Image: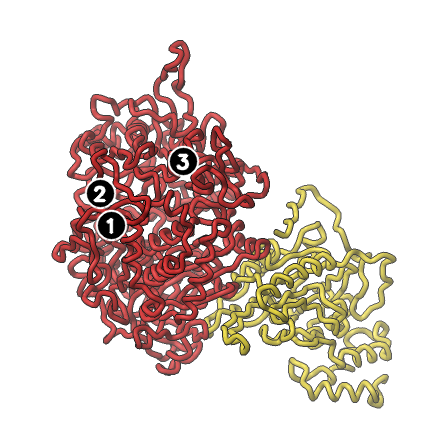
Amino acid sequence: MTNSWTDIKNTDLVVVMGGNAAEAHPCGFKWVTEAKANRGAKLIVVDPRFTRTASVADYYAPIRQGTDIAFLLGVINYCIRNDKVQWEYVKNFTNAAFVVKEGFGWQDGLFTGYDEQKRDYNRSTWDYEIGPDGFAVVDETLQNPRCVWNLLKSHVSLYTPELVERICGTPKDKFLTIARMISECSSPVKTMTSMYALGWTQHSKGSQNIRSMAMLQLILGNIGVRGGGMNALRGHSNIQGLTDIGLMSNLIPGYLTIPTEREPSFDAYMSTRGFKPLRPNQMSYWQNYRKFFVSFQKAMWGDAATPENSFAYDWLPKLDVPAYDVLRAFELMHQGKMNGYFCQGFNPLLSFPNRKKITSALSKLKFLVVMDPLQTETARFWENHGANNDVDPSKIQTEVIELPTTCFAEDEGSLTNSGRWLQWHWPGGSPPGEAKTDAWIMAQIHLRLKELYRKEGGKVPEPIVNLDWRYKDPHEPTAEELAKELNGYVVSDVPDPSDPTKTLLTKGKQVVSFAALRDDGSTACGCWIYSGCFNEAGNNMARRDTSDPDDTGAYLKWSWSWPVNRRILYNRASSDLQGKPWDESRKLLWWDGAKWTGYDVPDIAPTAKPDTVMPFIMNPEGTSRLFTRAMMRDGPFPSHYEPFESPVVNVVAPKVRGNPVARVFRNDFEQFGDAKEFPYAATSYRLTEHFHFWTKHAHANAVLQPEFFVEISEELAKEKGIEKGGTVRVWSKRGSVTAKAVVTKRIKPLTCDGKTVHIVGIPLHWGFTGAARKGFGPNSLTPFVGDANIETPEYKAFLVDIEPVAGPVA
Amino acid sequence: MFPPLPNPTTAPTPPRFGDQDLIRRSASTVTPPAKRQTEVAKLIDVSKCIGCKACQSACLQWNDMVEEVGVNVGVYDNPHDLTPASFTLMRFTEWENPETKNLEWLIRKDGCMHCEDPGCLKACPAPGAIVQYSNGIVDFVHDNCIGCGYCVKGCPFDIPRISKVDNKAYKCTLCSDRVAVGQGPACAKACPTQAIVFGTKDDMKQWADGRIKDLKSRGFKNAGLYDPPGVGGTHVMYVLHHADKPEIYAGLPNNPRISPLVEIWKGVAKYAGFAAIGAMAAVTVVHGIFSGASRVSPHDEEKAKEMAEKPPAGENA
């Protein structure tokens, strides 16, 4: 989230699209009901199904899954054509005026530089024209035909209300009503918030779905303001923490990146991370990259990371591929190239697409270690459960080791919520049986490995034997010790430059924030964005003060928010070029003549002059980006692509299947079905009664939603002779499931490009362990393809067929 | 936001109400207290409810009830009806508004309404099995319950359920145990959107007024409060977007009132000198009146009216 859950109460318009907040985030949704009840805010829901969120919405419109980009570019087109643009914001705070290089273009669904063989673009034309002064060329008059604004205007002109209806199946009048409601928020005194979740990410163009809305929010001037923002509702508690800490194969904590094979030396690595400002006077905060990186290396290897060995740069792994994401990991397992797997707090047998492939991959492992508080299906993947897990245990040789762990309520630590708040928690009970904390288990493994490397040597022992392990009890680092390490500490005294008799930083003290970090090895910090969470003031994450001056919803003394306790990112953009709030009744940060002041921690240097330093300090431009240059693999602007399995052809680019640069492994291409064989458009989702595959282990939750079902319209039920509560079989090219049928008015057939499209809704939650009835998950059916940029699997749009079958014999 | 109640103290506190505050006791006479306690109420704002079932879960947990894991019969309602373990239930209705042509998904939390004039209590032949406190809470005292099921038939909302395990009647207590120590009901505490709030009945009516104004401003011209006068008002009230049509919310009665059957039974009890001859004898006498279908049919109603006007011979034998 750019904003926070509590800030949603400040909005005038909530758009829930690509999510179902009332259903999947019921506790956070209270802030929507607050905005509605106290501000008279309106709620719009756009979804293939009439969801629980829609049940309390002011306006609902249906949309075919996987067509959000067309809808949103349609809204942008509407705003531009009707002059519903926050012009002052767009001209000053976005890259609308930046001039793009000659040669960039878009045709037949493809941007310049496409290589069909590589399924990739040469992105060299996707950038600004650089002037003789070394800065990007801008045209503040917006007259240059190659300035971002004019390119955008022409790019979205295709997406008329008629085309939106043709692609999305959203009736034109409903689309226009929503476009009109949204466009009203271009007023500086009206804001809209976007609440989205996996309904936007789990597509082969998920990142571009989100980009589309981010662009719309920028055009309306809704980023950095109270009641605005791009608010990603994370799918798990602490999944925000997971990404912050960099638990992905291509990241290290704080969104720093793992080196690649092309960066054999620290100098080579840093050479592409200069982040030189693209406009005069801009902060380009990533210029501090080296400080964050060196401090991370010091946290990892302590005294062994020295200037002489480039702070142990060689001990970091170097990627030979863009990322070892989960799809690639299971592909490698499937090929027999990955032989061991540690599965920590994860249930891949039900979570990853194409379950048949997952089962086959796990069966080829030599060993599988499962660390989990619950007996997951993954730990039992080898066990026969009839139709629900039809495997032959005698043919599976994988050794499975289960290590029971504590759950969140049994240990201490912090959880990072969607709004970037790090909230400390304390154990509410004792762990059962032999359950141990994850930290204890990891410490045991590490200490044993370290000992083995010491005794027996082996290839590259240094990263293991030199790993800094300065915990009071090496067998179980405490949550506080780990949090202090993430915050960072002073490794050696740093003298005060203005008075050498004093120290600026004193050895052994916690650093106050990342502003204190240095690139000479005198500071250590496990995760720079978390710096400040546990400094000399104590554990700021444990703060529980509910005071909130003037009821702004900031709650600055409750827990701690990254970065540096800031609650709304880009908050300098809440004021105009002179530093005067756009909306006096909802002011957030303003220039008092000498410095920035207000209700939040300024997202800019406190004395940075308002008309000189622009608000988007992380970007070398100083502005936000309507055009993302070469930073996304599938285009500097979003473009409509159909899902890989779609009931209709792409009317914008009939020859393009799916996202043209999404990675597809060779054998998986053959596993895609087409609309002739599989005529119905399926989607997957969660239900409020359950949380993923955990709560089916809890009796009360099993009572509230006991049995796997699929949802279809009354029309499809009639066509196929399916009865409400009857049993159906649903199958795709990759697998088959049986389920109860919920026949509902909440799903209606859509008309897309003249064709009737029926939707089949498939909730997740059921498996073959736990208290609920045995069932299936949608991953038995879903295709093995991910987003072009971050490889999130395409769970939200795929093709199936359905038929009634005889129910199970009692 | 509705101000949340502070957490209770961990020190033992005397209950805020008890037997001395009874205003009604089934099949008995009580001397009402000189001063009635402030009436309480639970307000369920259907227009804020997202159907998450946190209330159902909280109810099971607080009351330490184990409901069976059922099946899916093609709807979201689980269990499929109120049970002796499930005192509350979300009922989902898909309603196409004939005026706007829009689909509305009406979700109503069903459960005991805690009527000011409780049909269950009036129908109950077992002394002290059903009581009403002066704050309005209607509670079942299971030690005194004989499992006859008359409360089920006396209830205009079809709420109580008889357990097959101990043959006693069960329903929502309005968390009388929590209210006694200054807390609100568990369902209200668990509700994430404050669709369920709890307080004095006057405060709840006032809170409802604000909600109704908001709904009217959004085009629900018939938004209103459900506090049916036919049962003297209730201590569980609903804010409905379509208060003119309560029946569209999974059959919420339009004008609930106590069945005339119960009024006869009251007469019978009086003549029978009920307390003297004992509950079982009384049960035998009225068995004929109440036996039959579990719901009161129009035919029953008509017959009852006749009987009320002209008592059958030999009834006081």
Identify the disc placed on residue A129: 2
Given contact means CB atoms under 8 Å apart, are the residues at marks 3 and 1 in contact? no
Q: Is residue A646 left or right of residue A81?
A: left
Position above or below: B98 against A96: below
Three-letter residue code for mark 2:
Glu
Mark 1, residues whose alpha carbon is within 10 Å: few (<14), some, or many (≥20)?
Answer: many
Q: Name the residue: 24% across, 50% down.
A: A146
- Where is mark 3, residue-wise? A611
Q: Check contact, mark 2 vs mark 3: CB within 8 A.
A: no
Q: CA distance from mark 3 to mark 1?
A: 25 Å
Mark 1 sits on what residue? A146
Q: Position of residue A787 (x, y in %)?
A: 27, 55
Percent coordinates x, y for residue A502 in the rendering:
41, 12
Residue under disc 2 on the same chain as residue under disc 3? yes
Query: In the rendered image of this protein, does residue B252 appear above or below residue A484?
Result: below
Sort mark 2 into few (<14), some (14-19) or many (20+) by Cα contacts within 10 Å.
some
Classify mark 3: residues with Cα within 10 Å, few (<14), some (14-19) or many (20+). few
Task: Indicate the quadrant containing the C terminus of chain A: top left, top right, bottom left or bottom right.
Answer: bottom left
Chain shaded yellow: B
Q: CA–CA distance between discs 1 and 2?
A: 10 Å
SS for callout 1: loop
Q: Tag 3 or tag 2, which sits nearer the N-term?
A: 2
Residue type at mark 1 is: Arg
Q: Chain of mark 2?
A: A
Please give the chain letter of the residue carrying mark 1: A
Q: Earlier in the sequence, mark 3 or mark 1?
A: 1
- Asked whether the residues under the numbered discs 1 and 2 touch, taking CB atoms below 8 Å apart as contact, a structural biologist would say yes
Left or right for A517, reference B170:
left
Task: Tell me the shade of chain A.
Answer: red
Residue visible at 47% across and 35% down? A601
Residue A43 location, x and y as percent? 50, 60
